[in-house]
């Protein structure tokens, strides 16, 4: 599909990706991943930025705002 559907942060992106894909719950993200699975689609992870602990929340919020403007993100919260 080629669109950003979720923005998050992690110290271990590979592990976090597996956790998200394997935990299909009753959240926006869970419903979206379930629908993608039914359609035979697989989400791909892209690391947007690497940053230190001191500003990680500010940067996460920046990317959520950036991709959420005029689009759809499955994030349940804003950074």
Image (cartoon, rainbow, N blue to C red):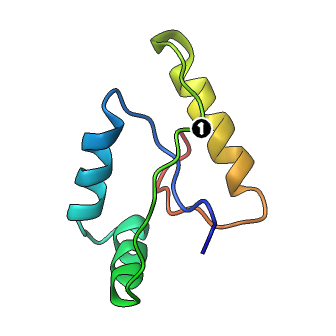
39 vs 79, nearest the viewer: 39
Left or right of 61 on screen, residue 34: left
3 vs 75, nearest the viewer: 3
The quarter of the picture where the N terminus appears is bottom right
Q: Residue furthest bottom?
A: 39
Q: Secondary structure at mark 1?
A: loop
Please tell me which residue is depicted at 24% across the width and 42% down the height of the picture: 15
Please tell me which residue is depicted at 59% across the width and 30% down the height of the picture: 49
Please tell me which residue is depicted at 21% across the width and 62% down the height of the picture: 23
Image: 35 above or below 47: below
Q: Quadrant of residue 5?
A: bottom right
Please tell me which residue is depicted at 41% across the width and 89% down the height of the picture: 39
Image: 21 above or below 63: below
Q: x%, y% of residue 26? A: 29, 72
Left or right of 71 on screen, residue 2: left
Image: 33 above or below 73: below
65 vs 19, nearest the viewer: 19
Q: x%, y% of residue 52? A: 50, 13
Query: How many neighbours does mark 1 have within 10 angstroms: few (below 14), some (14-19), or many (20 or more)?
Result: few
Image: 69 above or below 47: below
Residue that carries the numbered disc 1 in the rendered image: 48
Q: x%, y% of residue 68? A: 68, 56
Q: Residue furthest right?
A: 70
């Amino acid at each position: 599909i080629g669109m950003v559907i979720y923005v998050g942060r992690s110290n271990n992106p590979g592990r976090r990706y597996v956790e998200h894909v394997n935990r299909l719950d009753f959240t926006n993200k869970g419903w979206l991943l379930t629908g993608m699975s039914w359609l035979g689609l697989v989400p791909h992870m892209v690391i947007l930025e690497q940053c230190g602990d001191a500003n990680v929340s500010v940067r996460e919020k920046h990317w959520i705002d950036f991709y959420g403007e005029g689009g759809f993100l499955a994030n349940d919260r804003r950074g």
